[in-house]
Amino acid sequence: MAKEAIKNITIVGGGSSGWMTAMYLQRLYNQSGGTVKIRLVESKDVGTIGVGEATVHSIRFFFAAMGLDENELLRETNATLKNGIMFRNWMKPKDGQTHEYFHPFEQQRPAGPLDNATAWVQSPKHVSYAQATSISSELISNANSPKTATSPQYQGIVPYGYHLDAILMGKYLRKKACGAGVEHIEANVKHVKTDGETITSIITNKGEFTSDIFIDCTGFKGLLIESLRDNNWQSFEQELPCNKAVAIQRKPLLGQSPKPYTLATALTNGWAWEIDLSNRQGTGYVYDGNRLTRKEAEAELLEHLGDSQEILKTVHLDMKIGCRKEFWIGNCISIGLSGGFIEPLESTGLHIVNVGARLLATHLSSNAPTQPVRDSYNKTLNGIYQDLRQFIILHYCLSDRDDTEFWKQAAKTAAYAKGLPEMLELWRNKTCEFMDLAGGYGTIFNDENYRFILYGMDHTPDLSQPASEYEIQNILQRLAQQQEQADKSAMLHSEFLKLVSK
């Protein structure tokens, strides 16, 4: 029997995840004259969390594919550009200096038979790995953006992400999605009607709605997916115990332009972020709620910030760290926080939404998907979450801090990621390379990203490659020349923001 095409899809929940998904599906099915009805139901009474203010670089491809004007996007969300993340205090001080390292988005390919990492490892190492091999590291040292005066939209000297206001982002995407034809209904869901593991309709204060497919974007509560099956959650809190956050919005730092990078500083029982938007700073403390109270966490964050900037807003958050065992059950698919969450250390929240929505293009091809199709979707997303989980664990397990019980336990977390202890031992004796990670579900972080973390955390291999000093210096000099050329052509971050604001 021939399968029937999808006639309608109902998304429950707004925010960035709901509206990104709505916009993507509207463009996927209807841009060329399709007739799939895309409906989004959201409640006025349920607020957006609105603190996920940084992204990875791949989100640019989503915005570009949706036909959004990048300058308009930046203006509407008070956004700035992000060259990467500066990590501070994740290891003990060395020679009286606070430990820090930089993780950029770029990957500089070697020009000869000897790779860049091996050249740096076997050099005298007068500078860090990022400083030696990364253009982005040089850009931030001079407060430069990744853009030149002539860079096309969504392109730059190096890959870049954004810092943006998450609430404004949701509103902007809603405007664009509705303008493209998405039906928007403001209503409270009172009841989810099910038949076994299939949703037949949702009952709201604005009436009852049926649909071929329901997409759950209701955040941590997972209103739809939870109605279909119990015991469908796998927790990562044993290995990633930071399950609480206090977020503070405050006025811009006086006399300082917005930084073109995120700052992540390790504290006693977690880490604090600092993200500069064009109109304010977002900061917060992601911490282990079993070791600190809300009051203690807020006090430690304020002490860390150490100044008297005017506070605009303070929010305390409870986070579920983990993901669904199955993201797609029956005719319901969970995307965003309803599907899972890994602490925001590498700003992967919107990336996961992007991946989850884009997978629908190949999996959601009829109104009655088969179980093998659902299994494929679930297997892929589970693999992606496990891959991200391992990468986040890497940041913790390499730390040598032992000043609190939190950090003593963090050093033991590699054991929770199958195969990671063996790879860490391997990477003591060779550089981390693509084939070491091949066969996984990496969608954003590759061998180069691993090297920035490994070498930034002093996990460098013991090598004795038969390479001449001349060859090594030639490679590092070539990289230095690329940095210098990029620095000369890049716009100051502050100048770029002025240009966009016009």
Image (tube, rainbow, N blue to C red):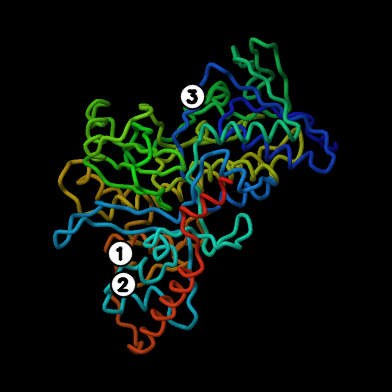
Task: Give the quarter of the image for residue 332.
Answer: top right
Q: Secondary structure at mark 1?
A: helix
Depth order, front residue of 458/142: 142
- The three-letter amino acid code for the residue at tag 1 is Glu
> Distance of mark 1 from mark 3, alpha carbons?
40 Å
- Residue named by callout 1: 425
Q: CA distance from mark 2 to mark 3?
A: 45 Å
**Crowd rating for badge 1 (residues with CA inside 10 Å; few <14, some 14–19, many 20+):** few
User: Which residue bears the numbered disc 3?
Assistant: 221
Identity, as a three-letter code, of the amino acid under mark 3:
Lys
Q: Total marks drawn?
A: 3
Left or right side of 92 for 422? right
How many residues crowd mark 3 within 10 Å: few (<14), some (14–19), many (20+)? some
Sequence-wise, which precedes: disc 2 or disc 3? 3
Query: Callout 3: helix, strand or loop?
Result: helix
Whether residue 244 is visible:
no
Foreground disc of the pair 2, 3: 3
- Which dot, 1 or 3, sits closer to the camera? 3
Q: Which residue is mark 2?
A: 429
Q: Is residue 300 left or right of residue 185?
A: left
